[in-house]
Image (spheres, rainbow, N blue to C red):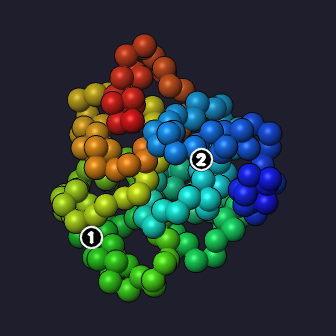
Amino acid sequence: RTKDGLIFRTKPWKHQLAALQYLMKEEHSSAALLLKMGAGKTKIWIDLINNKDWDTTLIVCPQKAARVWMKQFPIHSVNKQILLVNLSKLLGRSKVELVRKITRERKFGQKVVYIINYDSIWREPFRTYIKDKMRFDAIICDESHRLKSPSSKTSRFLQVLGRRCDHRYIATGTLLAQHPLDVYAQYRFL
């Protein structure tokens, strides 16, 4: 525990602590972490989820990153009551059925973190279900350069979801992968 009341399972590096302290401020409900690969972005987000009073968080990331999140969460999370759900491996209707089941059977006060890949978040029937039936306290887009095309289905759908969520974040090491306009759709989500 730090002097400002932050809790950790694993000790943060200096830059991770500075980033977390910045993100914890109420006026920073939308932010971007622009850190190189290996800088520990995932730990920062896990620490943020542990230290915020959020019930439901959505993490959108590439398929491979979903596996990293599933491995890193138990290492860095202090809260054993967080239900971590990887929706990336499921197909269409089974995603909706699992989320409905979790919503019905969730224990009082239990936090839920859903992880889903960019390629499936916008596909039906899951798209309509989360747009119409779910509310997230926070949405984190990991490897957000995947949103760089403003006309892509993924980018447009996350823009819609982002409007309905109070806390929106992006993380990437390559904000401007090819062109200065790559940043537009990412910040539109924010």
Mark 2 surroundings within 10 Å by alpha-carbon count, few (fewer than 14), some (14 through 19), many (20 or more): some
- Residue 51 vertical position relative to residue 64 in the rendered view, above or below: below
Q: Position of residue 187 (x, y in %)?
A: 39, 29
Q: Earlier in the sequence, mark 2 or mark 1?
A: 2
Of the residues tagged 2 and 1, which is closer to the observer? 2
Q: Position of residue 48 (x, y in %)?
A: 60, 53
Looking at the image, can residue 34 be seen? yes
Query: Furthest residue to the top?
Result: 180
Residue 8 or residue 118, whichever sits in front = 8
Secondary structure under badge 1? Answer: helix
Are the residues tagged 2 and 1 within 8 Å (C-beta)? Answer: no
Q: Position of residue 36 (x, y in %)?
A: 65, 31
- Residue 179 vertical position relative to residue 145 in the rendered view, above or below: above
Determine which residue is flagged by label 2.
24
Which residue is pictured at 38% across the width and 49% down the height?
A: 166
Residue 104 or residue 151, whichever sits in front = 104
Q: CA distance from mark 2 to mark 1?
A: 31 Å
Q: Could you say which quadrant of the image residue 41 lies in? A: top right
The three-letter amino acid code for the residue at tag 2 is Met
Which residue is pictured at 28% across the width and 64% down the height?
A: 134
Residue 140 or residue 153, whichever sits in front = 140
Q: Could you say which quadrant of the image residue 96 lies in? A: bottom left
Determine which residue is flagged by label 1.
96
In the drawing, does residue 158 fall left or right of residue 170? Answer: left
- Residue 189 vertical position relative to residue 48 in the rendered view, above or below: above
Q: Position of residue 13 (x, y in %)?
A: 80, 43
Quadrant location of the N terminus? bottom right
